[in-house]
Image: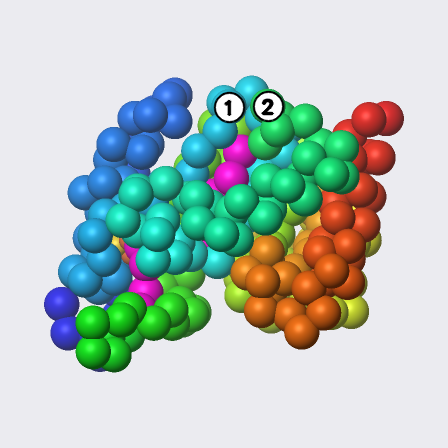
Amino acid sequence: MPSTEAPIGAQKFVPEGTRELDELKAAAAGCEGCELHENATQTVFGRGAASARVVFVGEQPGDIEDQKGLPFVGPAGRLLREAVDAAGIDASNVYITNAVKHFRFELRGSRRIHQSPGPAHIAACRPWLVAEFALLKPEMVIVLGATAAKSLLGPAFRVTRSRGQLMPWPASAQHPGDFPAADVQALATIHPSAVLRADDRDAAYKGLVDDLKVAAEALSR
Ligand code: SF4
């Protein structure tokens, strides 16, 4: 598919009436809803318990995730798991996924350099996220980083301004017949890869943990 064409989107690949995350994952493996599947190694679907109370949503899989077919298994994922643990969130209550399920990159020599997904990729991939939410019915969604936050919470949302604040899902970010239910709580924070890139990594990590402690506290009530 030439990149100038609008993506057809993932909806036609989402099985109707599915009750199992594994079934969704298997179907997503064959998704050709946008051109990102052409160069990436494989679809990287979410993972975690079907009974998870919290869903983390990042931007897209990275290089290592693309190769392994699992989300958040690279350095950023390790750091996120440490932060989740440090904040006191029970890892068995967590499901983790991305707004876009194929790795977008640019080849420079033999290196694959991360490129943020565009609005068209996020829109194309949204049916998978909606389907995950429909099965999981989480109490809380934690959005990681600016790209995921803008796509889920609205283009005006600023992570820098509103991070670490637990809020009802913004009415302006609700879509008819779509996720989320009105009683889902939302919290945005920085993406763990931003901690890895930060000049003051300790301070950035502490900020991430502090944000997640707000979620932990709410989940313990
Ligand atoms: S990024 Fe999403 S919509 Fe695009 S091909 Fe992959 S799974 Fe399908």
The amino acid type of the residue labelled 2 equals Ser
Please tell me which residue is depicted at 38% across the width and 69% down the height of the picture.
Answer: 114
Point out residue 112 in the picture as x, y percentages from the top left corner: 28, 69
Q: Quadrant of ligand 1?
A: bottom left
Is residue 97 shown in magenta? yes
Q: Mark 2 near mark 1, Cβ–Cβ under 8 Å?
A: yes
Point out residue 158 in the picture as x, y percentages from the top left corner: 70, 69
- Of labels 2 and 1, earlier in sequence is 1
Q: Quadrant of residue 19?
A: top left
Q: Which residues are magenta?
A: 95-105
In this view of the protein, can residue 8 be seen by the observer? no
Q: Quadrant of residue 221?
A: top right
Please tell me which residue is depicted at 25% across the width and 32% down the height of the picture.
Answer: 26
In this view of the protein, can residue 197 be seen by the observer? yes
Q: Quadrant of residue 172?
A: bottom right
Q: Secondary structure at mark 1?
A: loop
Point out residue 161 in the picture as x, y percentages from the top left corner: 78, 69
Is residue 113 shown in magenta? no
Q: Is residue 7 above or below residue 180?
A: below
Q: Secondary structure at mark 2?
A: helix
Mark 2 sits on what residue?
A: 92
Mark 1 sits on what residue?
A: 49
Left or right, 213 with respect to 41, comes to right
Colour setup of the view: rainbow
Please tell me which residue is depicted at 82% across the width and 43% down the height of the picture.
Answer: 214
Q: Is residue 145 above or below residue 4?
A: above
Please tell me which residue is depicted at 37% across the width and 40% down the height of the picture.
Answer: 70
Q: In the image, which is nearer the foreground, mark 2 or mark 1? A: 2
Pick the front one: 17 or 80? 80
